[in-house]
Amino acid sequence: MRTGNLVDLQDHNLSRILELLRENGGISRQDLVEMTGLSASGVSKLVGELIDKGLVVEDTIISRNKGRRAISLKLNPNSVHAVGVRLARHSVQCGLFNVYGRALFTTTRDFRTRSLAEAKSTLEELIGETLEESKARSLKVVGIGVSAPGPMFSHEGRIVLTSNYPEWTGFSVKEFLASRFDMPVYVEHDANVSVLAEKWFGKGVGSNNLVYVMVDRGVGAGIFYDGKLYRGNHGIAGEIGHTTICYDGPPCECGNRGCLEMYCSSFAVLTQAREVLAAETAPDGQLTIDVIARMAREGDPRALQLVTEAGRFLGIGIANLINAYNPERIILGGEMSKAGEPWFRAVKESVRQRTLPEVYSGTEIHLSELETDPAFLGTGSLVISAAFENVSELQTHDVTGK
């Protein structure tokens, strides 16, 4: 009889093989032996189990060193799938993802109000629609992954605070969805989901020590450290938007004063912009970050001042982040990343001024270049990662690798 520890060890080894195949498709059993340090017989047994479960398929004959030939292995893209959901302040986006993060089906709906009731009904309807699509395609779904605005207790899937959306406070997304759909539900802060997307598909590939900073209506950081998400004791690690940068600054909805996001979020910038810029500068009379960025590019000194000042304040928060966590890479995304080069330049200059020269030069700072919103793209990764970590719990099924 296998003990729990042996099951955990086997799951760890199976997960490691799946991750290597995801990162390096088209490798052989012998390659896996060399990459993992496991014995040839051990790798052969583990690969056999993954093939039996339909997660891995044998692909083509490849040449190895000294002209030897071997069978390459790859993940079966049709093995397991995930429903991914991006719950934002203004909309719900839902999709069906395969093991490689490819969206096979997506649907989106904007909110008409800020009511929790509308958010709940929209979540339930779009997820139901996506699951019906998976049934029509005969695809196996192993869970629902959700990104939500924070701060939130990720282990409970419960929103602690959503700026300007008071009804959402205390809403357990996980509990609500688990009561309606008979499958595992995983809920994370949108920045945590985004750092997973960057790790799998974006600027974070090849790094095990990175941070994604989402600068949207709020400001949060997703921290990926030593091969996994760092969540903290209550699951709210990375809430840099609610760190204090001015002890007697303006009051924040969290109850603190002088929070970082009061100075550099898109909400803060747009609030200031309405005071100093004429609304008629936008075609529809509405100011957006895109409009402000365009005005800054065209030389408007007021718009340029707004984006550079926001960048400087964000740089203070990132400098604190670097001194606290010392990441290898920092990736910036969210609505404020549309503010353009003046904003990004101000961020980096502010960080440079507030960190040790050697630390600054050894820290990469990038803008996200993912075409799909990482807070949506990463929701599928959230589910597939969990499935990979608990392979023994997946039922054996017969799926072809066409």
Image (spheres, helix red, strand yellow):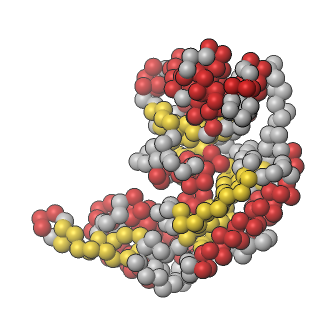
Quarter of the image where one finds residue 290: top right
Q: Residue drawn 40% across and 78% down?
A: 402
The picture places residue 257, in percent across and down from the top left corner, at 81, 26
Q: Residue drawn 58% across and 49% down?
A: 373
Q: Is residue 338 above or below residue 92?
A: above
- Residue 362 in sight from this viewpoint: yes
- Residue 244 in sight from this viewpoint: no
The picture places residue 340, in percent across and down from the top left corner, at 54, 29
Q: Nearer the viewer, residue 233 or 335?
A: 335
Q: Is residue 255 above or below residue 153?
A: above
The picture places residue 398, in percent across and down from the top left corner, at 48, 85
Q: Is residue 76 above or below residue 280?
A: below
Q: Nearer the viewer, residue 125 or 250?
A: 125
Q: Is residue 312 left or right of residue 66?
A: right
The picture places residue 168, in percent across and down from the top left corner, at 83, 50
Q: Is residue 60 left or right of residue 252?
A: left
| Quadrant occupied by the N terminus | bottom right
Quarter of the image where one finds residue 389: bottom right
Q: Residue drawn 65% across and 66% down?
A: 144
Farthest-out residue, top? 301
Q: Residue drawn 67% across and 58% down?
A: 108
Q: Is residue 384 above or below residue 357?
A: below
Q: Is residue 170 left or right of residue 211?
A: right
Q: Nearer the viewer, residue 215 or 12?
A: 215
Tag count in the figure? 0
